[in-house]
Amino acid sequence: MASVGSMTNPDDPLGLRDDAPLLDGWLSYRASGPVPFGTPGHKQRLDLVGPVVRDDIPLYGGVDTIRQQAGAIAEADRRLARAWGADWGRISVGGSTHGNQTLMLALCRPGDTVVVTRTLHRSLLLGMVLAGVTPVWVRPDVDPTTGLPTHVPVERVRAALAAHPEAKAVFLVEPTYVGTVSDVAAHAEVAHAHGIPLVVDQAWGAYFGFHPDLPRHAIQAGADAMVTSAHKTLPAYTQAALVLARTQRIDPHRLDRAFDATATTSPSGTIAASADAARALMERDGRRLLGHLIRIVDHARERFRDVPGLVLLDDVVDRSVILDRVKLAINVSGTGATGLAIEEDLIALGMPVELADRDTVVPIISVNDDQGSVDQFVDSVIASVERQRCASRPVLPSIAWTVEPDVILSPREAYFAEHETVSADRAIGQVSAELVAPYPPGIPVLAPGERITAAAVGGLRDAMADGTQVRYAADPTLKTFQVVSHT
Ligand SMILES: Cc1ncc(COP(=O)(O)O)c(C=O)c1O
């Protein structure tokens, strides 16, 4: 691996390539000026479709040469596992979506039951369709002031396991979209006392465990497996994700099989190399970078506290709830402004946020932000709030956090069942054949196999009327729904 002069190399400004085999492979391949006679068809040339294909290098036969497939990739995965204290780790180019499917397929068999948080991402639910698993849902508590989820109480999972001793695993999503975290260590104890693994979708917490003032990551807290989206919060390409496991309770061969079953056979080396680089960066400089991030987010928090009517989730949530200190979840209902109008103002300024709904705005502030960019964001939010300021309104918790499931069929049975399209009125009381979710956060409000309720349909329509995107419905107007025939 090259190292001489890498500290001053603009292609590797922090000199990470010595500890990042895929980054090293990527830089070497690019520098070699290849004239490839394999995929991709753009051949690293920009003269036909332009710079949209710039720097796209495949993982196999590019970042890692065909003959060395087991070399750099295996080494990068080994370093990944070591960095998280896991026994097994794989870099994915398919997002946490791929990781969730992998873990569901690796841990479960058709007909199994699992205890799962109902505020799961759709990818985990579709993992259940693939694996043929039936969920026993547990729900998080919701903070009454902001209408946002706080944590899944351990007692709720313990009760679910007592009622379903046949359950094969517990699946949680930690942190939530808004930065609240359950007591993962206590959940791990409960699952292990039951003789089953705890799996955590940690899509939003890729930096957990790399600074003492941030929550420990799921593996540190005792979970058996986790997935995280490197791309969401670390300096990695869109789609880069990390899947990690301890193998005491999980078979590593099934993990590999499940990972490969749901992965593309043509992974992007650029995405993978960026994940490898982000891992090396976090291991070496994470504490310093996150310390800086904590300071700039704390400063933003202080400024938001001065805005009358604006509420930060961390200021009102029960003190026992664990919080991600670099996540801001801002409730604006007390100012009369709406999160969606703030989002519009921010988009006009070229500053789109991760989540906005009627009452809430959630930005992602990452180690790539600096005081200047965050100050500009805070100024813009405050200006938008003041422009819209009017009478405050009561908080209306999003249906995504409060949905009350009534499971009639397993997700897989409903997914593959014959279905028919009926009017919304007729759909109420019938079993949903489709998955419908406000996005973000991508939590299914209608899930295949669950009875469709008036509250769910009303909540989806309210969300849509407020301007929230409601995705995946066969009829995007929500006038009709697809229901399972003859149940
Ligand atoms: C909790 C959670 N899990 C998984 C995912 C899927 O992640 P990705 O977009 O990396 O596939 C998301 C996406 O928003 C998510 O919020």
Image (cartoon, rainbow, N blue to C red):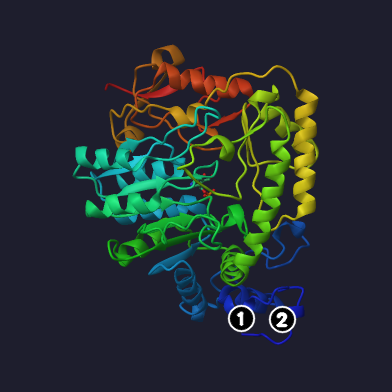
Image height of 169 relative to 259, above or below: above
Quadrant of residue 48 within the rendered picture? bottom right
Residue visible at 68% across and 68% down in the picture: 43
Q: Are marks 2 and 1 in contact (CB under 8 Å)?
A: yes
Label 2: how many residues lie within 10 Å, few (<14), some (14-19) or many (20+)? some
Residue 254, given in percent of the width and then of the height, sits at 31, 62
The disc label shown at residue 283, or none: none
Percent position of residue 262, x then y: 42, 55
Q: Secondary structure at mark 2?
A: helix
Identify the image quadrant of residue 367: bottom right
Q: How far across and down, in percent of the image, does residue 49 sit?
A: 74, 56
Q: Amino acid at mark 1?
A: Asp
Image quadrant where one finds the N terminus: bottom right
Mark 1 residue element: helix
**Residue 96 visible to the viewer:** yes
Mark yes or no: residue 445 visible: no
Viewer-side residue, 161 vs 479: 161
Q: Which residue is mark 2?
A: 6
**For residue 18, which numbered disc appears in the image?**
1
Is 382 in front, or is 121? 382
Would you say 47 lies left or right of 201 here?
right
As displayed, is residue 284 above or below residue 415? below
Please give the name of the residue rendered at 36% of the width and 59% of the height, measured from the top-left corner. Answer: 222
The residue positioned farthest toward the front in the image shown: 319
Q: Earlier in the sequence, mark 2 or mark 1?
A: 2
Residue at the spot 56% in from the left edge and 77% down from the top edge: 21
Give the CA distance from mark 2 to mark 1.
9 Å
| Relative horizontal placement of residue 344, taking residue 477 as reference (left or right) | right
- Crowd tier of the residue under label 1, counting other residues whose Cα lies within 10 Å: few below 14, some 14–19, many 20 or above: some
Residue type of the residue flagged with mark 2: Ser
Q: Nearer the viewer, residue 46 or 94?
A: 94
